Amino acid sequence: RQEEHVQRFYNLEKKYIPENFDYADISAFRNEAIEKFTRIRPRSLGQASRIPGISPADISLLMIMLKKRGIPV
């Protein structure tokens, strides 16, 4: 079970977020998530998932929006 968790962590680290991604353009994000993503500018989903105050739902929404915009995740 711990190996599965570690594997998921490594997989998120390999999923990159474009530098110019506009988080404010996603109206479904909570204001707190938009503020933190915009200020910190995470480079991967793994980094984004470690931001304090960012929920698993925020990460799922981010993955969905990246896919919709044709960004491989």
Image (cartoon, rainbow, N blue to C red):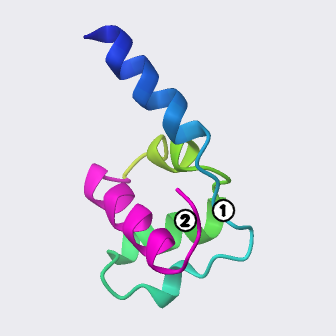
In the rendering, at what x and y percent does residue 1 appear? 25, 11
Contact, CB < 8 Å: mark 2 with mark 1?
Answer: yes
**On the picture, is 52 further left or further right than 20?**
left
Q: Position of residue 13 (x, y in %)?
A: 59, 38
Say if 47 sits above or below 73 in the image: above
Q: Residue at 59% x, 69% y: name it.
A: 71
Q: The disc labelled 1 sits on which kind of residue?
A: Arg
Q: Residue furthest right?
A: 19
Label 1: element kind = loop
Q: Which residue is disc 2 drawn over? A: 37
Q: Quadrant of residue 22?
A: bottom right
Q: Who is closer to the viewer here, 45 or 29?
A: 45
Mark 1 lies on residue: 41
Task: Place residue 5 in its image quadrant.
Answer: top left
- Where's residue 26, x and y in %? 42, 84
Asked if residue 5 lies left or right of residue 23, the reply is: left
Which residues, given as a range, are shown in magenta? 54-73
Residue at the spot 49% in from the left edge and 89% down from the top edge: 25
Q: How many marks?
A: 2
Residue 40, image x and y in percent?
A: 64, 59
Residue closer to the observer: 53 or 65: 65
Instruction: Classify mark 2: residues with Cα within 10 Å, few (<14), some (14-19) or many (20+).
Output: some
SS for callout 2? helix
Categorize mark 1 by other alpha carbons within 10 Å: few (<14), some (14-19), many (20+): some
Which secondary structure type mostly characterizes the magenta part of the structure? helix
Please name the residue shown 69% across and 67% down the image.
Answer: 18
Amino acid type of the residue tagged 2 in the rendering: Phe
- Against 18, residue 59 (above or below) is above
Q: Is residue 49 above or below residue 19?
A: above
